[in-house]
Image (cartoon, rainbow, N blue to C red):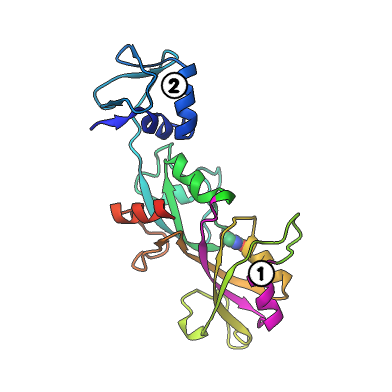
Amino acid sequence: MQIRMDKFLADAGFGTRSEVKKKLKTETVMVDGVRIRDAAFRFDPEKQQVTVNGKAVSFQLLSYYMLNKPKGVVSATKDPMEKTVVDLVPDGRRRDLFPVGRLDKDTEGLLIITNDGQLSHRLLSPKHHVKKEYLVLYRGALSPEAEEMLRTGVDIGDEKPTLPAELTLLSPATCILDVQNSDETENIDIHLCLIGITEGRYHEIKRMFAAVGSEVISLKRVSMGKLRLDPSLLPGESRQLTPEELMLLNEG
Ligand code: URA
């Protein structure tokens, strides 16, 4: 399989394609002992040997998993005490896999596990404004003013207010989240909504709801860009992305 040199080096972690293009001029990149300066040079990384400044660069096959993260698992690659999201995918012992961003330990839903640093960077970079949608079960009805604040941007104690969010109030009957330790009386004043945000600040949604006087009880991510969580995946289950899903994610 032939691949362009700039894509090969970018996938191997040498920077973005434009950074790699510059590096080809300044660093010594060789294929089978011949210096390559052209980013568009095509070769077969499974059969040909690439070196950068004398060091061999091995061919990295890119992997993409969709995980329905369960509650109670940490979004990390490894943890001395706890099970991590990477432990939940079939290739979990591979050291190159990592989650694209973090969900809180008590958040469930869509998480991509990959070794594609470029894709991860693009999906998470604040510059790209990739929308992430969450189902939110919360206590404390939102007043019209609170709804407006969530939609336009709310002060959560950071330097800047949050960016505008898309908010859709849903009927509790459509609720598909687990309410832990719930009982009849606790269920009073519990509501469900769908919110789409384009940032990924620490505890962002919990802090947004707290800022308008409500409290998040349960959070589930259902989409990232154009990619939706496969509803047939139970919490803790994962599978490889299909080529069509990967395209959707790249269109993000
Ligand atoms: N916002 C939160 O508060 N927690 C998450 O896990 C994701 C978004």
Q: Nearer the viewer, residue 146 or 182?
A: 146
User: What residue appears at the point 45 percent right and 27 percent down from the top-left corner?
Assistant: 21
* Quarter of the figure with residue 104: bottom right
> In the picture, which quadrant includes the C terminus?
bottom left
Give the side of residue 178 with respect to residue 35, left or right. Answer: right
What's drawn in magenta, residue-wise? 128-153
Q: Nearer the viewer, residue 189 or 93?
A: 189
**Measured along the vertical axis of the image, is residue 203 above or below residue 190?**
above
Residue 135 part of the magenta-drawn span: yes
In terms of image quarters, where does ligand 1 lie? bottom right
* Quarter of the figure with residue 199: bottom right
Residue 247 x %, y % = 34, 52
Q: Determine the secondary structure under disc 2.
A: helix
Kindly identify which residue carries mark 1: 152
Q: Point out the tag, 1 or 2, that comes first from the N-terminus.
A: 2
Dot 1 amino acid type: Thr
Using a 10 Å C-alpha cutoff, classify the residue at mark 1 as few (fewer than 14 neighbours), some (14 to 19) or many (20 or more). some
**Measured along the vertical axis of the image, is residue 121 above or below residue 235?**
above
Q: Nearer the viewer, residue 19 or 59?
A: 19
Kindly identify which residue carries mark 2: 24
